[in-house]
Amino acid sequence: MAPMTLPATVYRLTGIAPTMDAMFDATSVGRLAEHGVEVVPIDVSGAPAILYSRQLPAARTNWSAGLSHLAGVSVDLARQDGEAVLVVGVGEHVYGIGFGRGYLSMTDAKEPGFGLRCALRVVDPRQVQDVVRRTLGGVSRQDSTFVPGGIPIGGIGLRDHAELVRKLGGLIRAADLGLSHRETVSVEGADGLRLPIPVDPKAFLALLHRLNEISGREVPPEFGPLEAIRPVGGAALRARLDALLDEGLRGHGDLCLQIVVPVDLADRRHEARSYRIKIGSAVIVRDELDLDDLRWRCGVQYCLSPATALRKGYVEMCAGREGGELIGRVQAVRWIEATVSVGAYVYQLSDGEWYECGALYVESIRRRLRELIVDTPEPEMPPWRFGEKEEDYNLRVQHHFGRSNYVCLDQRFIRTSQHCRGRGFEACDGFTHRHALVHVKAAAGSQPLSHQFNQALVSTQALFFQPEARARFSAMVAQVSGGQITVPEDFVPRKVVLAVLLKGKEVTPDTLYPFAQVALVNLADTLRRDHGVTVEVVGIPAEVAWEEAA
C-alpha cells in the first residue's frame, strides 16, 4: 500500500513570484542549471509548479581507500544518488521541497526562520520535544535539548532574555495541518519546517495553504518570549556595528570573534571532513574551519568591506576530503559570532544578525514574577496577626487547616551525611496534603527573603538526591500528622510554595525588593529546569492592626 505521507522539509522561498515563468527564471540557477538536471513544468492540483530532478553518477565512498589500507584487503564501494526539487506557487508565496540532496539547491532562496515561525504557532507548548538555542552575551555556546516524549516549554529552562531559539520541534494535532492518518504528528522548525507531507496532490496543496495561514497567526503566550528578542533596528546602528565588525576582521578594535556552526548544520557536524570557503572569487579548502582563513579572505577583497564580503560569501561543509560530497552551504557570516561594546551597551552578531544583549532582561524578570505570584493560592494562607512570631504563625496555620490537610514542620530538622553539622536542614515550614513544601517568611527587606529562597533550594535538592533525607522526611510527616498525611519514602518535591508577608505591602512584582526579584526568578528557573519543580509565591495578608501600625 502506498504511503499516505512522506517526511520532508518545506521551505518558503523569497523574491520569487508564484508564476511558472518567474519560478523557472529564479530557480534555474546554481545546482539546478547543472548538467543532467531534468526540468518538468507540472500542475499540482491547479497550482503552478516545476519539478527538477537528476540521477547523480556513482561515486566511491570517501572511506573506502582508508578501510582497504587498514584491513589489508580491497574494499571498493560505490553508491548512486538522485535528487529532486519541487517548486510550487501557492497564493502569494513560493514553496520548495527537496528530496535526496535537493535541499542544497535552495540555499540562497530560503526565507530565514520560516519553519521556526510556523512551529512556534502550531506546536503544543505542553509537548515540546526539541529546542536548539544560542547564548547571548557570553561564551559562544549552542545548546540542544531533546525530549522524545515531549515536555512543557517551561521545563526546558530557557533564559528568554539571554538565549536565541533557533530550532523548535514538538507534537501537534494532525488535524491542524489537515492530516488525518493519525491523531498527532511531530514537526520541527528552523529555516524549513520538517513534517509529514501528504502524497495526495489536493491534500498537499491544502497543506501549503494552511502553512500560509499558520505563519500569519499570533504566537501563543507561552512562546511569546521566544520571539521577543529582535535583531537591532535602525540602519545607522547596524552600519556602525558592521563597521566595528570590519575593524575586527582586519585584526583591530576591541571585538571578540569566534567560529560557530550554523544551526542548520549542527546535527551533521560530525560528518564533516573538509570545508570549502568562497569569499570573493577564489575558493579555498580546509580540513578544519579556521577564523584566520575567513579573516584573510575578507581582508583581500579590495572592492568590498570585510563585513560585506562575509555576507556575500559562503562556507560549504563537506563529507569528503578536498571539498567533495557536499553536506550543506551556508552564508559565511553565519559561521562567525562577534561581540562588541558601544558605550554601556553590548551587541552580538549571531546567525548574521546583530542583537542587543540583555535588552529584555528587566521585562523578562517582571514577566516571570507575574507568573510566579499567583492570584488563587493553594493553600490560601490565613492573615498574620500583629506582633506574631513566625513559629507561632506556622503552628496556627496547622490549626487553621487541620493536620489532615497541613502540618507544621517549622524547627524540625533532618540530619544526613551531607547535613551532619549543627541540627541539619529544615525541609519546610509547612507541608500540605497535596505534598507541597511551604516556606514561610515575614520580611521588611531582601535578606530574610534570600534566607527563605536558599532554604527552599537546599531542602528541595536534598530530597531529590539523598535517600536518607527522603526516608526521614517521610517518617517525620507521618509522626507530626498522626498518620493523617502519608508520604512514600521515594518522595521527591513537585511543588514549592513561598508564602511571604511583606510588612506594610502587598506582594506584587513592583513591591518585591530588587535583589529579591532576581534571586526569586533564579531559584524558580533552577528548580524548574533541573528538577521539574513548580514554584509559586503566595502573599500572606496582614491583620488590620498590623496594616495600621505600618
Image (tube, helix red, strand yellow):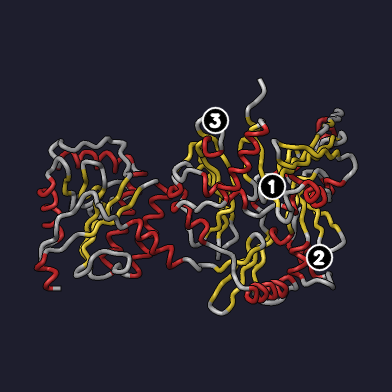
Mark 1 residue type: Arg
Give the percent coordinates (x, y) of residue 399: 10, 48
Query: Is label 1 in a helix, a strand or a loop?
Result: helix
Tag 3: amino acid = Ser
Q: Is residue 266 visible?
A: no
| Residue 435 located left or right of residue 28 | left
- Which callout, 1 or 3, points to the residue nearer the camera? 3
* Crowd around label 1: few <14 · some 14–19 · many ≥20 (10 Å): some
Q: Is residue 37 left or right of residue 536?
A: right
Task: Indicate which disc residue 269 carries.
Answer: 1
User: Could one spot residue 113 in this view of the protein?
Assistant: yes
Q: Within 10 angstroms of label 3, few (less than 14), some, or many (20 or more) residues?
A: few
> Where the C terminus falls, by quadrant?
bottom left
Residue 147: give x, y in percent of width and height.
51, 40
Residue that mark 3 sits on: 180
- Tell which residue pokes out farthest to the bottom in this image: 343
Q: Residues within 10 Å of mark 2 (few under 14, many from 20)?
A: many
Q: Amino acid at mark 2?
A: Arg
CA–CA distance in space, label 1 to label 3: 36 Å
- The N terminus lies in quadrant: top right
Q: Which residue is mark 2?
A: 297
**Element marked by disc 3:** loop
Q: Residue at x 21, y 44 (%)?
A: 432
Viewer-nearest of discs 3 and 2: 3
Structural distance between the alpha carbons of marks 2 and 1: 23 Å
Provide residue 106's location: percent of width, then percent of height: 75, 48
Q: Residue 181: x percent and y percent?
A: 56, 28
